[in-house]
Image (spheres, coloured by chain):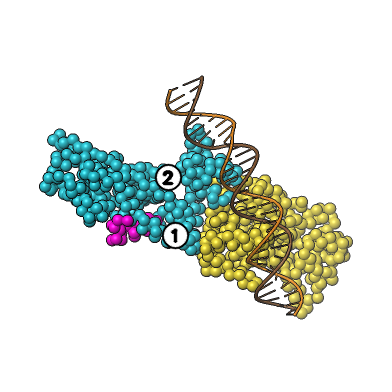
Chain colours: A yellow, B cyan, C orange, D brown
DNA sequence: TCTCTCCATAAAATAAATTTGTGTCTCAGT
DNA sequence: ACTGAGACACAAATTTATTTTATGGAGAGA
């Protein structure tokens, strides 16, 4: 009756499958099968109903889940309390919004590695919408995304707030500021991809009978947005911090438009599981790092 | 960071040595060394000071002990809650007073084996005094002995109360009852060994300037006491229940003396550790078994 | 029906833990 | 001092567990 078996059990229960749990735990599917089989044999009880497309907890299994989580939480607390920092071990799946990759993520990674050398990260860059789902389905342990977070299963702490700016190449023949929306609409608007908050906000600006049709180029890569803007393909709406360098050497410029852009409020979010000790710790670290003034400097 | 390692740690801490812990856990001393070394490495912390003749907990170790015990208690609770009976596994070191061996012990063993087939017992028969010490030093998990128990570290529950009777062979030329003490003193008094409650109580009866010197034959084996009494070597003071057969067929008889003998109140006692689940369970079973009227029948 | 996904199972390969056999150190008792 | 017993550390070999690789079967969906 191993802790490893209990941990496996918890992940299978959360993810609803042996295979996905295997991926999450960096093991093969038969290894997971063996651990669960062992646990079931030790307890003399069936823990999962193997249905065709997913496994579900039996009543006994549901009962065990509570204990198993308390057990793992206790272990985490114990490690924190009596172990040295290096004793905090594990792999955390972290989802990060791209803006943050371009600002302070590397500093966080550095600091984390310094403080907790045995914690490793698997970083995934994606849109806040996707990451929210992945948090809920336990595919991610922690994410830095655009808030606010409404889901009660998730805990979130504010990280930083970035302003979104209208940006264009100086070569673009913009009319005098503030640029009216109908003039703006002459160029494609390049920004975050569809299904993001800024994309929707901009789209909403152009709703109305007297408004011109607007072409929007949603892009999942901020670097590409910057590239396209530099090339004068259109105007863009991105956090000013991520183009600090381009602004400084004059290759891009910020302009005011008829309508200002909303701010982006980033938060760190993680599932409220009893064993989210490490995630909570990293979230705290992130608050520190994101709050530091130098955080805005690019790379 | 295994539960087995934590369990080992707890036993080493309680017993104050690797070797004794090894004996307790049915393992070799290097195995224990390895487990502790592993735990220390995982935590990055030294848990024991290896002094010359014993090991003592470091501050960190003391800190860990609390967590480890909570962890083991949680495991036991979990097994009890979600596992089937057969999932309750383990070896319990049980100390038993000989009177109980002769009355209801076998029924308890039978019942335990039926209810919890995976629990095994290591039974030791000894005097209550010795067993009390062994409970305190964690060499025994549970004992059935003569109460009451004053030690606050021990929990005890009443089991049964046996009367102690003056017994002699019918061939012994006893004066009319109640036999005065000074007549009694003509024969050796055969009873439990020195350092037992009855031995002391009888000795006390003969304290006083006008009292005759008494010869007392303390014996650690009740069977031997019975044998010697049958042979007419002297009178004895033993629980009447253990000689039910001899009384029935007239080979021994009970007589009244000037001073009555005290009762023997047996209790089940175990250390108040958080992981004493199984011991507590067996104690409860013992209460049932000892309370059953048929308990008095021999074998 | 065919295929895809998902879990179970068996055998082989790794990895871990245990035992066996010594070594060292210290204290207690000559 | 010297010696012996007791207690833990260490190393090599063995045993035991766990994991992987490879494959089979069963059900859902096209």
What residue is pinned by disc 1? Answer: B116
What residue is pinned by disc 2? Answer: B139
Q: Is residue B288 magenta?
A: yes
Disc 2, SS: loop
Q: Is residue A41 left or right of residue A110?
A: left
Identity of the residue drawn at 47% across and 57% down: B118
Task: Relative to D3, say whether B281 is above or below.
Answer: below
Which of the chains bears the disc numbered 1? B
Task: Relative to A251, say whether A56 is above or below.
Answer: below
Counting from the top left corner in percent of width and height, residue B12 is at 49, 43
Callout 2: few (<14), some (14-19), or many (20+) C-alpha neighbours within 10 Å?
many
**Residue B1 seen:** yes
Magenta range is B282-299
Q: Is residue A200 left or right of residue B214?
A: right
Counting from the top left corner in percent of width and height, residue A212 is at 80, 75
Counting from the top left corner in percent of width and height, residue A112 is at 67, 49
Residue situated in front as seen by the camera: B175 or B112: B175
User: Label 2 to label 1, Cα distance in Å?
Assistant: 22 Å
Disc 1, SS: loop
Which of the chains bears the disc numbered 2? B
Q: Is residue B174 magenta?
A: no
């Amino acid at each position: 009756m191993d802790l490893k078996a209990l941990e496996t059990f918890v992940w299978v229960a959360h993810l609803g499958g042996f295979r996905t749990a295997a991926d999450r735990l960096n093991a093969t599917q038969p290894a997971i099968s063996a651990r669960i089989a062992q646990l079931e044999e030790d307890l003399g009880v069936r823990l999962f109903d193997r249905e065709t497309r997913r496994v579900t907890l039996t009543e006994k299994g549901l009962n065990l889940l509570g204990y198993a989580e308390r057990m793992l939480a206790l272990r985490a607390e114990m490690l924190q309390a009596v172990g040295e920092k290096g004793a905090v071990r594990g792999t955390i799946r972290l989802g990060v919004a791209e803006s943050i990759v371009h600002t302070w993520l590397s500093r966080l990674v550095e600091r984390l590695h310094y403080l907790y050398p045995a914690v490793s990260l698997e970083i995934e860059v994606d849109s806040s919408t996707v990451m929210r789902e992945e948090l809920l389905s336990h595919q991610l342990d922690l994410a830095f995304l655009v808030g606010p977070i409404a889901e009660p299963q998730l805990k979130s702490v504010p990280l930083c707030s970035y302003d979104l700016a209208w940006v264009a190449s100086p070569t673009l023949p913009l009319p005098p500021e503030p640029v009216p929306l109908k003039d703006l609409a002459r160029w494609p608007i390049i920004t975050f991809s569809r299904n993001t908050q800024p994309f929707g906000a901009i789209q909403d600006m152009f709703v109305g009978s007297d408004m011109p049709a607007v072409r929007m180029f949603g892009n999942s890569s901020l670097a590409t947005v910057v590239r396209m803007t530099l090339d004068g393909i259109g105007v863009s709406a991105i956090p000013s911090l991520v183009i600090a360098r381009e602004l400084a050497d004059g290759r891009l410029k910020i302009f005011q438009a008829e309508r200002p852009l909303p701010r982006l409020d980033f938060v760190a979010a993680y599932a409220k599981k009893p064993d989210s000790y490490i995630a909570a710790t990293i979230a705290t670290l992130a608050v520190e790092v994101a709050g530091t003034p130098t955080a805005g400097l690019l790379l």
